[in-house]
Image: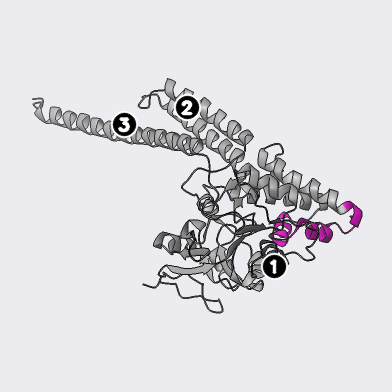
């Protein structure tokens, strides 16, 4: 059944919507992955780093973030800082990508304006500013986050957990109830700051990589080696033997040119037209399509509406929808793309899929939400009980008055 679409306003383009489909199956020789936004989610740290560059230059952070997304740092820095000399560029790229990892690990804190953008894209927000106008949808499994960020986030949650044990869940002291709720909100806010910048593995990635034999997949990224390897290692992904980074000596042009994917296919020994290419950003999707490979666009950094018209053969909400198995008889990879209703609904709601948080954090947050719900329920019951008591007292007073004989 087609998803109903509201009629566009006069002069407005009709909204593009994802349609339900049957599962699609095809065969490829190899898979070529983009890295950031495809394997890992580090958009908060990347945006914080480019936001810092924008502020340094007196530019609008949102404009700089939008202009740099999916492109090589060397190309972005050459455009933003043309005074950097060619022999200085390698060091400048390393310094910039180290900054991304510092934000991800919590060793650097975004400025007020950068944080405002990052917080508006937090996993509990309904929408955000920044590159994609994102709505975030949390994944369902545990995933990578830096040990530093984990300890910082859980320490505060642990403190509030201890406080909650000292305060009975159905305590009648409203002041304690309000104080605990304030502590809860503060804990969740600090959890956001600790984890929003962390590098997280994306849903479906672990299962897919584990299913593909070595030598039948590669990574082709716009990131340089410092950040690419650092990001993958932080979520437990071993960089494959063929990992094409921005400074590869044989790479002449970056995305949106197809060169990174063509070089990756060449190094694997496969025809790029017989490869599956997975991307998330508009420039990367254009590069993937131009390579001649079968392209899957995944809605992790941009909404369905932003990526559905760029030529990708398939658009999915997350890689949970894509199953890859090694067909030993045929000597190739079988790919099945599924389109479950919840994924279609998420894309049509303008959501993007976010990286996965550790199970400990999700469990702690769930506990505090449960406690908060219990508190609210107690307050509601108390108000209802007070109202019932008041009504009963009033009825009793009226009854007593009626029962009292009038004075002679």
Q: Is residue 216 left or right of residue 77?
A: left
Q: Nearer the viewer, residue 407 or 211?
A: 211
Place residue 406 in its image quadrant.
Answer: top left
In the image: residue 405, left or right of residue 325? left
The residue indicated by pointer 2 is: 161
Q: Given this view, does label 3 or label 2 mark the residue nearer the observer?
A: 2
Q: Nearer the viewer, mark 1 or mark 2?
A: 1
> With respect to residue 363, does 128 lie above or below?
below
* Residue that extends furthest to the bottom in the rendered view of this protein: 11
- Mark 3 crowdedness (10 Å alpha carbons): few <14, some 14-19, many ≥20: some
Q: Which mark is residue 382?
A: 3
Q: Which region is colored magenta?
A: 61-88
Q: Is residue 367 left or right of residue 231?
A: left
Per the rendering, the mark at residue 262 is 1
Q: Position of residue 295 (x, y in %)?
A: 58, 68
Q: Residue at x 56, y 66 (%)?
A: 296
| Label 2 SS | helix
């Amino acid at each position: 059944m087609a998803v109903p679409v509201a009629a566009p306003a006069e002069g407005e383009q009709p909204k593009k919507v994802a349609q339900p489909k049957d599962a699609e199956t095809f065969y490829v020789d190899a898979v070529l992955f983009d890295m950031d936004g495809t394997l890992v989610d580090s958009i908060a740290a990347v945006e914080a780093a480019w936001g810092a560059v924008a502020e340094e230059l007196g530019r609008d952070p949102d404009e700089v973030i939008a202009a740099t997304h999916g492109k090589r740092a060397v190309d972005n820095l050459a455009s933003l800082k043309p005074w950097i000399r060619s022999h200085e560029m390698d060091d400048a790229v390393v310094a910039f990508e180290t900054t991304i990892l510092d934000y991800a690990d919590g060793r650097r804190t975004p400025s007020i304006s950068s944080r405002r953008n990052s917080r508006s894209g937090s996993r509990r927000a309904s929408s955000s500013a920044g590159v994609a106008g994102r709505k975030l949808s949390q994944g369902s499994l545990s995933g990578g986050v830096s040990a530093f960020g984990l300890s910082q986030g859980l320490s505060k949650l642990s403190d509030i957990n201890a406080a909650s044990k000292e305060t009975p869940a159905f305590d009648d002291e409203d002041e304690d109830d309000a104080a605990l709720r304030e502590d809860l909100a503060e804990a969740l806010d600090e959890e956001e700051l600790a984890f929003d910048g962390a590098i997280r593995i994306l849903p479906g990635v672990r299962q897919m990589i584990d299913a593909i034999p070595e030598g039948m997949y590669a990574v082709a990224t716009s990131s340089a080696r410092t950040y690419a390897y650092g990001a993958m290692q932080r979520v437990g992904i071993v960089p494959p033997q063929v990992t094409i980074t921005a400074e590869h000596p044989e790479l002449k042009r970056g995305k949106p040119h197809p060169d990174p994917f063509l070089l990756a296919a060449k190094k694997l020994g496969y025809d790029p037209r017989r490869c599956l290419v997975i991307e998330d950003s508009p420039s990367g999707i254009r590069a993937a399509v131009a390579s001649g490979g079968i392209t899957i666009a995944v809605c992790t950094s941009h909404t369905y509406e932003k990526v559905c018209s760029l030529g990708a053969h398939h658009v999915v909400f997350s890689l949970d929808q894509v199953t890859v198995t090694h067909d030993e008889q045929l000597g190739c990879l079988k790919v099945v793309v599924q389109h479950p209703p919840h994924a279609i609904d998420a894309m049509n709601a303008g959501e993007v899929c976010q990286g996965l948080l550790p199970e400990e954090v999700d469990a702690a947050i769930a506990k505090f939400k449960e406690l908060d719900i219990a508190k609210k329920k107690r307050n509601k019951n108390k108000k209802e009980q007070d109202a019932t008591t008041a009504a009963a007292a009033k009825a009793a007073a009226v009854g007593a008055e009626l029962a009292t004989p009038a004075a002679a």
